[in-house]
Amino acid sequence: MKLVFAVAALAVVAFLPTLPAQASLLSSDPLAMAAWRGTQTFYAADDVYTLNVTADYAVYAPGQYPGTDPSVGADYVYAYEIFNTLNPASVGVTMLTVGLAPGSGAHYAGFTSGPPGQLGGAGPAQPRIGATSARWYFFINPVDYGEDSFTLRFTSPYGPRWMTASVDDGGLSADAPMPSPMPEPATLVLLSAGLASTILVRRRRAAASLV
């Protein structure tokens, strides 16, 4: 009789629907900086479509990242993971953009399917870091409902502050604050001085061309 019940229980489990991915380790990883780990919700909708997802984030002090650190412990590591598990009607995510301050020092952009986030279901195309943002593209392999992304990360010599991040599906876009590197005051002064010098040189050239 016990064997019959055991077989029946296994049969029920086998026919249960696949559940959405569970929460990533990023939002509660004790190795991450306590004030800089958590979850943000991204929501946008129009008359036809809905974008309703979450993104876990964690910032690791130099030498604390439990995964492969391309800076070899020299930098802060910024990690993110997208979860499309809130709403079955949600469209697939095709891009994550994290805003960067001038002089952020962000580099070594990449992704991994292993720890500290759980095994991801959607891997991005090659990430890009520009002057004002870091981006991961999922146009080929969107993060559809029931999936999470790979762990997305970059490094910087600077600690975090809040910057605007956005999640897109190719039509809808939703914004929320996420951690991003904040250059030290001395670096900002140097950047401002460099910008002022460039503007001055351009004005002098423009004035000389009018003579």
Image (spheres, rainbow, N blue to C red):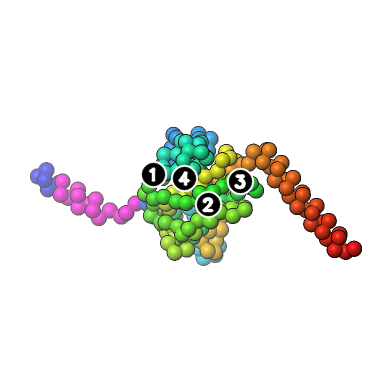
Look at the image and say whether residue 9 sits in the magenta stretch.
yes
Q: Which element is circle 3 on?
A: loop
Query: Which of label 2 and label 3 is nearer to you?
Result: 3
Query: Which of label 2 and label 1 is nearer to you?
Result: 1
Q: Distance of mark 2 from mark 1, alpha carbons?
A: 23 Å
Q: Could you say which disc has been placed on residue 104 in the image? A: 3
Image location (x, y in percent) of residue 97: 55, 54
| Residue type marked 2 | Phe
User: Circle 1 is placed at which residue position?
Assistant: 115
Look at the image and say whether residue 92 sits in the magenta stretch.
no
The secondary structure making up most of the magenta span is helix
Residue positioned 20% across, 52% down in the render: 11
Q: Mark 4 vs mark 1: which is more N-terminal?
A: 4
Q: Are marks 2 and 3 in contact (CB under 8 Å)?
A: no
Give 187 or 48, whichever is nearer the viewer: 187
Q: Mark 2 vs mark 3: which is more N-terminal?
A: 2
Q: Distance of mark 2 from mark 3, alpha carbons?
A: 24 Å
Q: Could you say which disc has been placed on residue 42 in the image? A: 2
Q: Is residue 149 visible?
A: yes
Neighbour class for label 1 at 10 Å: few (<14), some, many (≥20)?
Answer: some
Give 108 or 24, whichever is nearer the viewer: 108
Q: Which element is circle 1 on?
A: loop
As drawn, 18 above or below 184: below
- The image shows a total of numbered marks equal to 4
Q: Mark 3 vs mark 4: which is more N-terminal?
A: 4
Residue positioned 77% across, 49% down in the render: 197
Q: Could you say which disc has been placed on residue 70 in the image? A: 4
Q: Distance of mark 3 from mark 4, alpha carbons?
A: 17 Å
